[in-house]
Image (cartoon, helix red, strand yellow):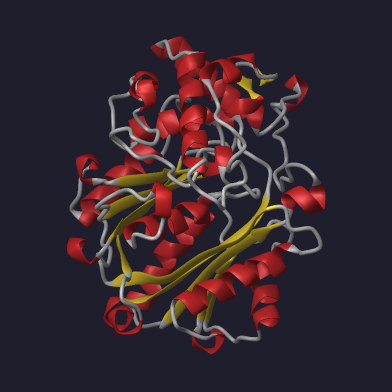
Amino acid sequence: MDKFPRGRTAVVGAATYGIGECPGLTPLDLATRAALKALADANLKLSDVDGLFLATPDDPLSTLAGAEYLGIRPKLVDNNRTGGSAFLNHAIYAALALEAGYIDCALVMYGSNQRSGAGGLVSMRQMPIYDRPFKPMNPMSSYALAAARHMHVYGTTREQLAAVAVAARGWANLNPEAFMYQKGELTIEDCLKARMVSDPLTVRDACLITDGAAAVVMTRSDRARDIVTKPVYLLGGAGEITHSDISSMPDMTVTGAERSGKRAYAQAGLKPSDIDVLAVYDAFTINTILFLEDLGFCPKGEGGRFVEGGRIAPGGELPVNTNGGGLSCVHPGMYGLFTMVEAVQQLRGECGARQVKGAEIALSHGNGGTLSSQTTLLWGNAASV
């Protein structure tokens, strides 16, 4: 079993900033504002930070720019880029460095002005030469391939994909920060009639394009209990990379979450039935179905049927993406850090109308590339350590 410092590190501050549209601000402007909010939440100062984890979409050397912008001189920096899973990987690295005593306070931050600055999706990836003749609309066409394969092998339907989007909108309507808050209910029929973008995925099967930023502050658990009343402990964390481009994915119906989840559960001493709330990377509706299967919440091939009937929506038996997710809350290029913030805030009981009653254990899961990189984190409140 992987060695992991179960419960020996914790998040003491978490925040978002600028969800929706923030014209006039750069990605680093946005990330810094979220970071300052998270530090205030943790009763800490910038001078306390000696570990910086940052990967903005516009700067491959973003930790250098970030340290300069913040006016700090960290001992350890990392801008490891695995797409949307990067920040969950950062949390793992931060936990290991904290446990080793190499650093004392880690700041994980991200920001993007993708909506107001670029007006559309911005990608640093190059299309592989094997895919170019087919002129895919990536990343959507890659996820459409996975959706089509799942439909072919397991009989998954467009109505079941739509159920994921409908559930996400239901949660967003309970979250005043969500971009789609009070934008009305979404129905299965709305999704089925929506504009087809890359068959079988319509515009309602795809994530938002927004601005936004998020940040978390981590420290060792012994210190955490001295500075905040409700630290949230990292109980397990594991990643898995299976490929780069979808054309090289070993099996389009099975993601690396199958193995990252098992390893994280083993580290934490938990199982899927222990999880009270899930925050998974729903860049597209097929993601949620795949991750529910691969993370053990239903058998392989049953994800479509599992999400029917509002099971993952407000009032359902399994709360999934309670902030509205990338589909209805926020998606500024990379969504992974927002899964961490939502997990933390749920376990601290701070989520208002969308709060999951009695939540003690949360799972956040990040996806990078085209189902290429998967990272699973398990979180717990004081009762779980």
- Residue appearing at x 32%, y 58% in the figure: 347
Label count reads: 0
Res. 362 visible in picture: yes
Q: Is 220 on the left or on the right of 266, as rendered?
A: right
Depth check: give the residue in front, 359 or 49: 359
Report x, y in % for residue 127: 72, 36
Q: Is 294 on the left or on the right of 128, as rendered?
A: left
Depth check: give the residue in front, 102 or 52: 52
Q: Identify the residue at the far bottom of this view.
A: 47
In the rendered image, the quadrant that contains the C terminus is: bottom left
- Residue appearing at x 24%, y 52% in the figure: 358
The relative height of residue 270 versus residue 144 in the rendered view (above or below) is below
Depth check: give the residue in front, 358 or 242: 358
Q: Is 380 on the left or on the right of 136, as rendered?
A: left
- Residue appearing at x 62%, y 46% in the figure: 179
- Residue appearing at x 39%, y 13% in the figure: 154
Report x, y in % for residue 338: 51, 54
Res. 78 visible in picture: no
Report x, y in % for residue 317: 28, 34
The relative height of residue 108 versus residue 353 in the rendered view (above or below) is below
Report x, y in % for residue 135: 76, 24
Depth check: give the residue in front, 254 or 140: 140
